Image: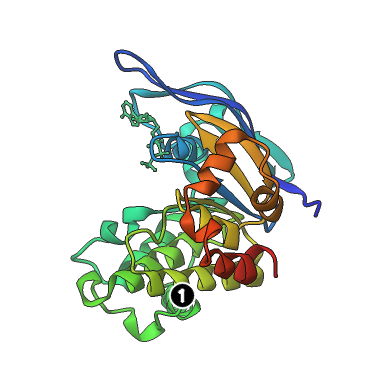
Amino acid sequence: MNRDPVLSVSGLSVTYDVDPPVEAVRDVSLTVGQGEVLGLAGESGCGKSTLAYAVQRLLRPPAEITGGEVVLHDVGGSDVDLTVLPAAEMDRLRWDQIAMVFQGAMNSLNPVLSVGDQLADVFTRHRPAMRRAERTETCGALLEMVGVGANRLRSYPHELSGGMRQRVMIAMALALRPRLLIMDEPTTALDVLVQREILQEISRLREELGFSVVFITHDLPLLLEISDRIAVMRAGRVVETAPAADLYRHPQHEYTKRLLGSFPSLTGERGDFVRKGGVTV
Ligand SMILES: Nc1ncnc2c1ncn2[C@@H]1O[C@H](COP(=O)(O)OP(=O)(O)OP(=O)(O)O)[C@@H](O)[C@H]1O
């Protein structure tokens, strides 16, 4: 399916300027279409998180973008290269246009503030004109939307399960209706059932709200289920990008074949679950 691009990464390279330097992302090019889920797969250390942080301009020294562009399309009618955007403008785009949920996100909630106050803070910072009553109502609606329930507005993080806290983080990421959600191992720390519920929730929300997703995980079977297209990374490079079903049935790159082969759930009997429940319905 042809979709208008929301994000185009071209020739992006990132180096950690340590001794010896680590070229964590090497000449990576990717596009993310409107409403698309792009899965980013690859073993630990291949550069997935570095790429995600680079896109959001959240890298800190010794990390340095050494080349390439990250273009966010149609920001108020024009295309913007995020790698050269002044920091203040980037701050405005973050959360508003691109939001991120990362693995440990649920533990980054402030323990001494209610979840309602933490959600409200996003609006206080980014929508300062919003009135208090509307803010509270919107925060309640957000908690409903992610299945936590508006009655939890006054709850503190420790009163919620890990799954609920991660849902709060998803609510926070979606608060300003971003066009792109970057999720870096967002469910890895949760048990399998909770993980599945949250993934279903993300799928539903994406259909409802139409945002695009970059979903990062080393869990290839999971990516095959939820992604439209998958990019496979190895040692900083994207070695193959293909629609999920094509990647599964006709992997082109040797490394992709090996990666697929390393998941018994894809090749053994249990693979039926992924095949029938996911890409080959
Ligand atoms: N602060 C740092 N200083 C030096 N090297 C780093 C730093 N952070 C990451 N790296 C290196 O950059 C490379 C890419 O790391 P990155 O965390 O992006 O990979 P990843 O695919 O996200 O791995 P994981 O799935 O384990 O998070 C690795 O070789 C890693 O050791």
The image quadrant where one finds the C terminus is bottom right
Please count the marks in the image. Answer: 1
- Farthest-out residue, bottom: 151
x 27%, y 74%: residue? 161
Residue located 61% across and 71% down the image: 277
Q: Residues within 10 Å of mark 1 (few under 14, many from 20)?
A: some
Q: Residue at x 41, y 77 (%)?
A: 136
The one of 271 and 231 positioned closer to us in this rendering: 271
Q: Please indicate, yes or no, whether residue 93 appears anywhere in the rendered image.
A: no
Picture quarter with the N terminus: bottom right
Provide residue 142's location: percent of width, then percent of height.
47, 74
Q: Position of residue 240 (x, y in %)?
A: 64, 37
Picture quadrant of ligand 1:
top left
In-image side of 159 versus 279 (left or right): left
Mark 1 residue's CB less than 8 Å from ligand 1 = no
Between 118 and 199, the one nearer to me in the picture: 199
Name the quadrant containing residue 49. Answer: top left
Q: Which residue is mark 1?
A: 197
Q: Percent x, y for residue 22?
A: 38, 20
Taking the image as shown, residue 103 lies to the left or right of residue 239, namely left
The image position of residue 48, as x and y in percent, is: 46, 39
Q: The residue under label 1 is which amino acid type?
A: Glu
